[in-house]
Structure formats: structure tokens, C-alpha cells
């Protein structure tokens, strides 16, 4: 993936670049909104990390003026719901409040990059030996039905949408619970352990890998 | 609306404009009265002329009277003095004057209006009518307009006096009105200036009797209350941040300095850096909670308010937390869940319930049972979280509730200790009340929301 980092703080920009390169993502840096608009016309990027608050041409204006359909992950110190809604309304695909974890940025870039390609529009999701139908809340492993409750089903669906890539705790809270706040008790772990128990009930191996304190990855290939 | 440059810029200007409009209205009324009176007098005169004509030209034995007959009738009427203020002029075909002494002058434009005089008298305004006789003679009848002229003479000075009086009183009333409004505005101005100078407690005086000015003053004062509350909130948040961040920041600094010391074993250093990282997480979540409270109290979430169905939200939160309770050797159960609607922000409601449930989990011993219920009680939707833990002693319950308001918090509890302050802020946002009660043993938290009707869609 080829990423454009738009951030006026050189320190943060280089921290991001190091982190993304370490995870095998190519990236360029634009230190101003204007530089970003110039780069966007000369190269094709798979996604863009965009700082909201920059002098002269700010992130919101870059969103309005950017050419084409580059998916955007907006970074901002402004974290109220109002700010998020404003950013997402202006055309950002996801919104992350500073300070951020580099893993969170990568997981979200992967998610929006994938979403932009529009591959999972279908009602049915498949990952390895798992199959779910979103509208009827039904799930199968190796053709055997799984009896999941609403939360377990939503967790599995979110993991399957991002199969093979890590999904962070915050992404799960947003996608499964729809909370704009992060609960302090570990409701994710407890619900995830119920889901895992149901996935392995017939003696199949656990397809979910835990990255402690960070998130989860559903491995689809090894079972297939 | 008037264009900007024509709008009065001061109260005096406004009052002056008012006075001018009143004076112009008086003049217009006077002129209308005059025109109407003139019309009605003319009608009376025309009726007199018609009657006179009917008398003089009445048929004699079934034929129209000739000039001679009319002359005789006129002479008869003059002799009997039956016809005051009516004059005649009768001529035959050749223009010879047969009867009457009235002299006429060319009409000055208006239909029927002429000037006439009797021999030896001055010219006077009159109305005239002309008729052709059967034998070719011409009869002119003239009615003096003396009476209307006299009336005019007496009405004009009266009207002038009335106009002058109304202008004087109008000017006085305008001036008084101007003074009164200026005084009201000055009171608001004085208050505003005091507030600019930093005295946020100042308010505009409100008339005890009510009325428009009192209503306006009250609205203005409510706005000032809101501003003061926001300022207080800002001060509170700033001092909270300063106060609450200092401790963890000091700890963080100490940890980092220790980690930077020479001669540490690698695993010791790693442990210290991990501790510093955890401290940072704590600071960030404290920061998020403070900002969230500020966001809620400042009313920045109004846009998200809608009619929300509480039952599914409560079911969802309880269902999500039940496994977490089981994992920590406690139980969480949904005791009752009646259909209720409120006007509110679903995300904030979730956070309120999550905070109460997390509180119950944190502050009860293992093996405790927590029950959640949602019930409709008259005009309220009552959310209740009840545990069988140690509860809060009655003497301190009031104090804990007080802490909600003052945002002070117990420092011995795990977490950032802002959970209940956030609950109070969210309840306040929804105009809900929070009650703490004894569950004997345990704690009951009741949040009473004003219920909304199911049919409402906004």
C-alpha cells in the first residue's frame, strides 16, 4: 500500500512514516495542505493519513479539494462527537483522535483501503471455513451452524470483514457497540471468549489470535 | 423593513419618528373630514335646488310653464319671503332678464359651483342649477354656500388648535417614551458593562409586575445565567485538569527519571517504561473523561438529541456486560425492562448505564449480584442499578451525591474516579435526577428521566 501522510508537525510525520514503513507500507510526507494537494495530483495513493488542524490549508479543505477517491483517515486532537461527525461528513472515511497508537493507524488504514475497493458489499461473508449471512444473523463453521448471540455475531462479522488483519479494540467498540467512548471494563475480552468457545465447540482450532491490549486477528487461511 | 440608513439610530430618533407619524395622521384625518363634510353639504344644497326647481317648474293644467308663469311664481315667492338664501335669474329667448336679481360669474371649475351676488352685496360662493323652459326661456337657481363657508371658518381654527395640541402632546409622549426606553436600555447596558468588567453575578432588574420589559429582562438574565454557568464550567474543567493531572504527571516524571538512571538492569528499565506507559494511558483516560464532562455540561451534544427507545439500549448493555461480570465472579441480570421513550442522546445514555454498571462491578465483592431495571413510573422512565455489595452508609450518601455536583471525587477508588461525575453530568443533560438509596445491603442508584410519548418522532 502506498500512503500519503499529511501532517504539519514534522516530528509526528516522521514517527508515522517510520511506523508505517516498519509494517511494510510505502509512504510520502506532505508537511502542508498545499503540498498534499500537489502530491495528490502527481501520484496515486491507496490511502491518506490527514491531520485536521494545519495552518493555511487545513485538513477539512484538503478533504474538499482532493482529487479522486483516495480513502482518508483523519487525525485530530479535536475529539468531541461533533468534531468527528464534522470530519466524517466532510468526506473522511475514518477519524482517529490524537494521541494514537501506530498499530491503530495501520489497522484502520487497512480497513478503509479494503472498504474503498468495495469487495465486501455482499450479504454473505466467507473467511476460511467460516460463513455468515449478515441479514439473517446466521453463521456456520465447516457447514455446521453456530449459535451466536447478537454481540458474538457482530464481533465475528467485524473480524471476518478484516480477515487476516488485526482489528483494534477501539475499532471493535465502534463497529460492534457503536459507543463513542471506551469502556474501562473488558467487555470485549469477555464477549470474545464466549465467541471463541462457540467457534471451537466441535474441536476445531481457534482461528482468532489475540494481540494483548491491542486487538484481534482472524486467521482465515490456515483452516482453509 | 426600512433600508439601514433610514432606520432611526437612537431612541430619540425613534420617538421623533413616532411623533411625526402621529402629526401626519392628524392632518390626514382633518383633510378627510373636510372633504367628506364638503361632499355632504353639496348634496344638501343640490337637494334644495331640486326642490326649488320642482316648485317653480310644476306643470300648470298639464302643460309645462312658460317664462311668464315662472316669473310670476318667483315674484310670489319673493313677496312671501319664502326663499331665503336662494336666488333666481330668469331670461327669455332673447336674453332679457324677466325675474330675479342674482348676478352670476363663471364657475371656478367645479361642477355646480359658482360665484354670485345680490345687488349691492359682495360676491359669495354658491351652487347653481340651470334649466331650459318650454318656451325657450332659461331659469338659473342659485343656493348660497354661506352655511358651509361659515362652518369652514369655525372648523379650521378648531382643527388647527387640535392639530397643535396633538403635536405638542405627541411630542411630549414621544419624549417620555424615549426617556423610558432609554432608561430600560441603560439598565441593560449598565449590567452588560459590569459583566464585561468581570462581575458575572450582575443581573438586569426585573419589574415585579411583569410585562414585556420584565419578560425581556428575564430572558436576558437567563442568558447571563447560562454564560455564568459556562464560565464556571470552564473554570471547573481547567482547575480539575490542573488538579487531577498534576499527581499522575508527577508520578510519570518520577518513573521516567528512575528509568533514565544509569546502572539499571534491562528488565528493571523495561518494567519502569511499561509503568510509565500505563501512567500515560491513565492520564489520557482521565483527560478524555474530563473533556467528556465538559462537552456534556456545555450542551455541545444538543444536535444528537432525538426520541430514543430505552429498552433495547438497556438490553444491549446488560447483554454485553453479563459475560464480563461472570468472568469476574459476579452476576448481572436484567430484572425488568418496560418500553420507555425519552428525549435524549443514545450514546450518552449508553455511557451513563455503562458507568453505573462498571461502578457496581468495581465496588462490590466477588459473588455479588447486580440487577438492572427499566420501569415506566407515571411521567418518568426510571433506570435502576441495584447491587448487594457494601453500599454507601446513609451519612455519606448525601455527601456522595453532593460530590456529583461539585465534581469532587473519592481518590481511593480504582479508575479515574470521574465515573459518577459523568453520570451526574449526563443525567443533568437529560433533565434527569439521580437518587442513591440503601438496598439493605447494597446500593441502589435510580435515574429518573422525564418520559416522552411513544408517538413523538422528534
Image (cartoon, rainbow, N blue to C red):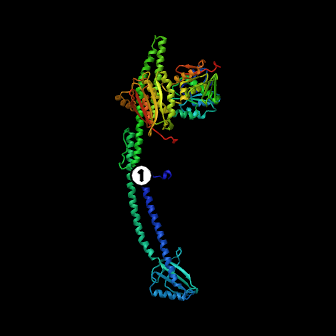
Residue at position x 42%, y 39% from top?
A: B226
Residue B255 x/y as whole percent: 44, 17
When asked about the image quadrant of residue B66, the answer is bottom right
Residue A15 seen in this snapshot: no
Q: Can you tell which quarter of the image residue B258 is in?
A: top left
> Observer-nearest residue: B263 or A222?
A222
Is B71 displayed left or right of B237 in the figure?
right
| x and y, in percent, of residue A124 in the image | 64, 28
In the rendered image, the vertical position of residue B37 relative to residue B284, given as above or below: below
Chain letter for mark 1, please: B
**Percent of width and height locating residue B203:** 37, 42
Vertical arrangement, residue B429 with respect to residue A146, above or below: below
Q: Where is residue B165 in the image (x, y as percent from the top left)?
A: 39, 63
Q: Give the mark count.
A: 1
The quadrant holding residue B63 is: bottom right
Looking at the image, residue A135 lies above or below residue B86: above
Residue B385 can be seen in this image:
yes
Q: Nearer the viewer, residue A95 or A153?
A: A153
Q: Disc 1 on helix, strand or loop?
A: helix
Q: A94 or B199, which is in the foreground?
A: A94
Extreme residue toward the front, this view: B335
Q: How crowded is mark 1: few (under 14 residues within 10 Å), some or many (20 or more)?
A: some
Frontmost residue, A85 versus B115: A85
Residue occupying the far left of the picture: B395
Query: Which residue corresponds to mark 1?
Result: B11
Amino acid at each position: 500500500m502506498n500512503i500519503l501522510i499529511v501532517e504539519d508537525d514534522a516530528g509526528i510525520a516522521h514517527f508515522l512514516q517510520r511506523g508505517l514503513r516498519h509494517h511494510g507500507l510505502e509512504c510520502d510526507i506532505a508537511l502542508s495542505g498545499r503540498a498534499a494537494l500537489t502530491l495528490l495530483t502527481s501520484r496515486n495513493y491507496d490511502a491518506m493519513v490527514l491531520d485536521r488542524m494545519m495552518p493555511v490549508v487545513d485538513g477539512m479543505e484538503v478533504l474538499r479539494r482532493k482529487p479522486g477517491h483516495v480513502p482518508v483517515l483523519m487525525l485530530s486532537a479535536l475529539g468531541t462527537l461533533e468534531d468527528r461527525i464534522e470530519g466524517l461528513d466532510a468526506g473522511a472515511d475514518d477519524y482517529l483522535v490524537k494521541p494514537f497508537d501506530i498499530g491503530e493507524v495501520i489497522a484502520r488504514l487497512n480497513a478503509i483501503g479494503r472498504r474503498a475497493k468495495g469487495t465486501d458489499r455482499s450479504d454473505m461473508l466467507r473467511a476460511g471455513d467460516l460463513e455468515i449471512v449478515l441479514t439473517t444473523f446466521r453463521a456456520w463453521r465447516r457447514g455446521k451452524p453456530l449459535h451466536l448471540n447478537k454481540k458474538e455475531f457482530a464481533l465475528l462479522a467485524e473480524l471476518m470483514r478484516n480477515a487476516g488483519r488485526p482489528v483494534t479494540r477501539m475499532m471493535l467498540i465502534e463497529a460492534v457497540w457503536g459507543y463513542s467512548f471506551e469502556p474501562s471494563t473488558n467487555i470485549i475480552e469477555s464477549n470474545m471468549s464466549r465467541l471463541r468457545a462457540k467457534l471451537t465447540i466441535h474441536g476445531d482450532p481457534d482461528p482468532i489470535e489475540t494481540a494483548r491490549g491491542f486487538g484481534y486477528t482472524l486467521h482465515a487461511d490456515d483452516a482453509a | 423593513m426600512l433600508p439601514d440608513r433610514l432606520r432611526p439610530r437612537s431612541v430619540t430618533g425613534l420617538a421623533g419618528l413616532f411623533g411625526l407619524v402621529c402629526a401626519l395622521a392628524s392632518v390626514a384625518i382633518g383633510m378627510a373630514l373636510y372633504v367628506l363634510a364638503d361632499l355632504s353639504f353639496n348634496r344638501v344644497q343640490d337637494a334644495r335646488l331640486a326642490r326649488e326647481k320642482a316648485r317653480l317648474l310644476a306643470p300648470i293644467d298639464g302643460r309645462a310653464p312658460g317664462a311668464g308663469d315662472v316669473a310670476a311664481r318667483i315674484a310670489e315667492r319673493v313677496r312671501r319671503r319664502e326663499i331665503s338664501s336662494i336666488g333666481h335669474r330668469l331670461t327669455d329667448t332673447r336674453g332679457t332678464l324677466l325675474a330675479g336679481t342674482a348676478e352670476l360669474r363663471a364657475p371656478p371649475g367645479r361642477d355646480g359651483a359658482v360665484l354670485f351676488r345680490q345687488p349691492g352685496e359682495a360676491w359669495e360662493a354658491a351652487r347653481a342649477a340651470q334649466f331650459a323652459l318650454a318656451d325657450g326661456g332659461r331659469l338659473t337657481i342659485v343656493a348660497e354656500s354661506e352655511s358651509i363657508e361659515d362652518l369652514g371658518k369655525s372648523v379650521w381654527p378648531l382643527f388647527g388648535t387640535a392639530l397643535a395640541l396633538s403635536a405638542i402632546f405627541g411630542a411630549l409622549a414621544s419624549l417620555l417614551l424615549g426617556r423610558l426606553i432609554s432608561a430600560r436600555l441603560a439598565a441593560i447596558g449598565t449590567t452588560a458593562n459590569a459583566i464585561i468588567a468581570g462581575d458575572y453575578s450582575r443581573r438586569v432588574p426585573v419589574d415585579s409586575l411583569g410585562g414585556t420589559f420584565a419578560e425581556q429582562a428575564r430572558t436576558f438574565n437567563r442568558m447571563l445565567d447560562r454564560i455564568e454557568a459556562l464560565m464556571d464550567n470552564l473554570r471547573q474543567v481547567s482547575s480539575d485538569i490542573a488538579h487531577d493531572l498534576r499527581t499522575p504527571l508527577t508520578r510519570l516524571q518520577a518513573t521516567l527519571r528512575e528509568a533514565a538512571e544509569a546502572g539499571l538492569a534491562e528488565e528493571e528499565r523495561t518494567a519502569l517504561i511499561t509503568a510509565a506507559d500505563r501512567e500515560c494511558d491513565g492520564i489520557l483516560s482521565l483527560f478524555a473523561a474530563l473533556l467528556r464532562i465538559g462537552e456534556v455540561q456545555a450542551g455541545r451534544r444538543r444536535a444528537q438529541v432525538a426520541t430514543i427507545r430505552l429498552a433495547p439500549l438497556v438490553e444491549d448493555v446488560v447483554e454485553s456486560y453479563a459475560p464480563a461480570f461472570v468472568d469476574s465472579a459476579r452476576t448481572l441480570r436484567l430484572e425488568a425492562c418496560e418500553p420507555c421513550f425519552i428525549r435524549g442522546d443514545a450514546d450518552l445514555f449508553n455511557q451513563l448505564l455503562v458507568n453505573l454498571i462498571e461502578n457496581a462491578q468495581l465496588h462490590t465483592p466477588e459473588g455479588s449480584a447486580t440487577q438492572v431495571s427499566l420501569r415506566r413510573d407515571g411521567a418518568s422512565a426510571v433506570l435502576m442499578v441495584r447491587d448487594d455489595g457494601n453500599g454507601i452508609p446513609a451519612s455519606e450518601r448525601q455527601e456522595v451525591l453532593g460530590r456529583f455536583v461539585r465534581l469532587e471525587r473519592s481518590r481511593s477508588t480504582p479508575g479515574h474516579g470521574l465515573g459518577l461525575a459523568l453520570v451526574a453530568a449526563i443525567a443533568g443533560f437529560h433533565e434527569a435526577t439521580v437518587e442513591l438509596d440503601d438496598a439493605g445491603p447494597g446500593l441502589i442508584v435510580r435515574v429518573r428521566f422525564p418520559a416522552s410519548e411513544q408517538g413523538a418522532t422528534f
